Amino acid sequence: MQALKGAEVSAKIKEQVQAILAEPGVQVPRLAIVRVGERPDDLSYERGALKKMEAFGLLAQVYAFPADISDQDFKTAFQAVNEDPEVTGILLLRPLPSQICERDIENMINPEKDLDGISPVNIAKVFAGDETGFAPCTAEAVVEVLKANDIPISGKRVTVVGRSMVVGKPLSMLLLKEHATVTICHTRTKDLEGTCRNAEILVAAAGKSKMLDSRFVGDGAVVVDVGINVDENGKLCGDVDFDSIAEKAAMATPVPGGVGAVTTAVLAKHLAEAARRRSK
Ligand code: NDP
């Protein structure tokens, strides 16, 4: 089984970002990372994003707020970032604490700065197959992994395990746009094992440590593991039991070192794209 390394895909995306920045009139863009509280997941994603922006020659700034900030105070602060002409794009770390109405923020964010596809405008564009918006970075990262490794998508049977608005649903739409025959699975799916085994490309985005083992994988399948979980020994792991599928799958992304590295590269590409659109 061949491991599909995220670093190699990220390097290809870096070339695309540099090509955009070299276009006449495109200014070096600035990312605003908006964080409320200090959840370890958020801090880890923030570190990864900051590192990636620096490596790609892009600017980034963190706007951190206390976990107990009121809904009104956060909205006022968020609107200031949203309207700041120095800010090219925004990454909002979620979920927000329960006192803040996340739906209001999704409606507030300027779709042109919404790099992670949370605004209803961008979500509608993903579902309409309209490329003028921004798709959620993780969903797009899965498609980037397949394309960068020259894995054909058109006409393939693709099974996506997970139907969240962050990964499963938008990813299914992006794959459909690439002419895949997509099956979406969730907790009510009957015969998950057979549905997964029938797939030529299997995408795991369930958030359950190593739940998919060799029984779920067809011979020669390509497996993309979006899951980021912690196993019983406190080690980072995916939704796929990587060792177990080695004899069955043709290729698979490892965790860590797979989709995660590509997600921040896609974020960087969206930031550069936002700068390009602004220059027009
Ligand atoms: P959610 O918890 O929002 O969604 C999980 C989905 O998986 C749900 O649709 C759920 O079904 C389905 N599911 C859960 N358990 C099972 C099961 N046993 N059988 C079938 N379906 C199941 O998670 P997210 O979409 O936000 O994230 C998924 C994973 O991806 C997580 O591990 C997360 O950490 C990771 N992630 C990784 C990123 C990256 O950059 N690589 C970025 C974002 C997320 P139902 O709808 O029926 O409940």
Image (cartoon, helix red, strand yellow):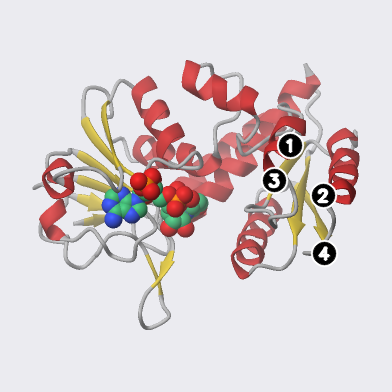
Chain-order first, disc 4 or disc 1: 4
Provide the residue designation for mark 3: 91
In the rendered image, residue 109, in percent from the top left (x then y), is placed at 75, 33
Q: Quadrant of residue 174?
A: top left
In which quadrant will I find the C terminus?
Answer: top right
Chain-order first, disc 1 or disc 3: 3
Is there CB contact under 8 Å for labels 1 and 3? no
In the rendered image, residue 221, in percent from the top left (x then y), is placed at 17, 45
Provide the residue designation for mark 2: 71
Image height of 98 relative to 67, above or below? above
Q: Which mark is drawn over residue 66?
A: 4
Is there CB contact under 8 Å for labels 2 and 1? yes
Q: Quadrant of residue 156?
A: top left
Alpha carbons under labels 3 and 2: distance apart: 18 Å
Identify the secondary structure beneath mark 3.
strand
Alpha carbons under labels 1 and 3: distance apart: 16 Å
Three-letter amino acid code at the position of disc 1: Asp
In the rendered image, residue 238, in percent from the top left (x then y), is placed at 36, 62
